[in-house]
Image (spheres, rainbow, N blue to C red):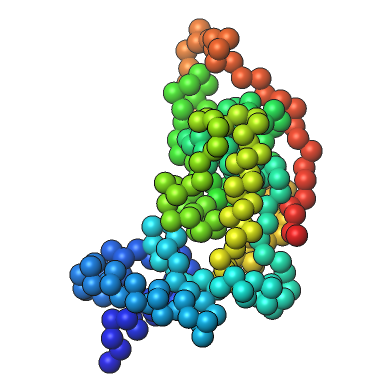
């Protein structure tokens, strides 16, 4: 009969997403502390150069990932390169990651360009999600990072997100710094899974067939009816900039 270590390895190997110690304890019917002890042993064992993958703590759970030394081999095997995002996508994602929850007008005010196409891309990739509507005038939909954001950038939790060096809130100068943090995490690339390459890498072919970002927001969170006399103060007014020219996703 397989021991608990083997059972935990099997569950982690079969799962497409990180699995928490609590979930493993419930599945196996053992104490969480015992699971954590076993996970520590598995983590140590697979750090050996005799193995091509290791155990990583990601997004509040544990997951097997190929080691960074296999990056080129894996990319060659799938005849694709490791996942990459365009600069515009990295900038919008960094704004959401640091400011979340963030509304579309707030994001566009910081970047100075229309971000509807980028938001659609990030929604399709499952890196962000709509969390509801703000109480600000117009009740815009608010965005936040999705669980897959932690998985993709291999961050244990949002508390481990790299801080901005000089300013507390994102603005136009800090957007590039936030995007650089994301790029550093991608370049670190502590391994990836087949679905990372198959589902995420390259330009999404069905983006043009998606509904508009406005329709997606309305479907997720129907607009609230405002009194006719409702006005927006000058301090709260946000000018929506001209649309940004679409850019192909970088794959290098």
Q: Is residue 239 above or below residue 38?
A: above
Q: Position of residue 188 (x, y in %)?
A: 60, 60
Compared to 186, does 71 lie above or below?
Answer: below
Which quadrant is home to the N terminus?
Answer: bottom left
For the view shown, which residue lies furthest in the front direction?
Answer: 166
Q: Position of residue 167 (x, y in %)?
A: 54, 30
Q: Which residue sits furthest bottom? A: 1
Q: Identify the residue at image location x=63%, y=36%.
A: 175
Residue at (69% x, 28% y) in the render: 112
Q: Position of residue 195 (x, y in %)?
A: 58, 68
Q: Residue at x 75, y 54 (%)?
A: 250
Question: Which picture quadrant has residue 28?
Answer: bottom left
Q: Can I make out residue 137 in this image?
A: yes
| Picture quarter with the C terminus | bottom right
Q: Nearer the viewer, residue 132 or 225?
A: 132
9 is higher (above) or lower (below) than 56: below
Asked whether residue 27 is in view, the answer is no
């Amino acid at each position: 009969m397989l021991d608990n270590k083997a059972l935990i390895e099997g569950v982690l190997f079969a799962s497409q997403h990180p699995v928490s110690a609590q979930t493993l304890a419930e599945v196996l019917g053992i104490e969480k502390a015992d699971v954590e002890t076993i996970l520590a042993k598995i983590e140590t064992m697979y750090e050996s150069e005799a193995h091509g993958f290791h155990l990583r703590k990601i997004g509040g759970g544990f997951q097997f990932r190929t080691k960074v030394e296999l990056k080129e081999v894996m990319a060659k095997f799938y005849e694709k390169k490791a996942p990459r995002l365009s600069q515009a996508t990295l900038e919008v994602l960094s704004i959401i990651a640091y400011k979340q929850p963030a509304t579309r007008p707030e994001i566009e005010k910081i970047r100075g360009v229309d971000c509807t196409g980028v938001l659609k891309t990030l929604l399709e990739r499952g890196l962000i999600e709509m969390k509801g509507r703000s109480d600000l005038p117009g009740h815009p939909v608010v965005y936040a990072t999705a669980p897959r954001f932690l998985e993709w950038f291999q961050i244990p939790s949002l508390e481990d997100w790299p801080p901005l060096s000089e300013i507390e809130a994102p603005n136009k100068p800090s957007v590039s710094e936030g995007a650089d943090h994301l790029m550093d995490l991608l370049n670190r690339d502590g391994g990836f899974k087949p679905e990372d390459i198959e589902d995420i890498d390259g330009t999404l072919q069905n983006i043009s067939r998606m509904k508009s970002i406005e329709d997606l927001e309305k479907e997720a969170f129907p607009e609230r009816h405002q009194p006719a006399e409702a006005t927006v103060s000058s301090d709260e007014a946000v000018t929506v900039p001209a649309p940004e020219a679409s850019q192909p996703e970088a794959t290098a």
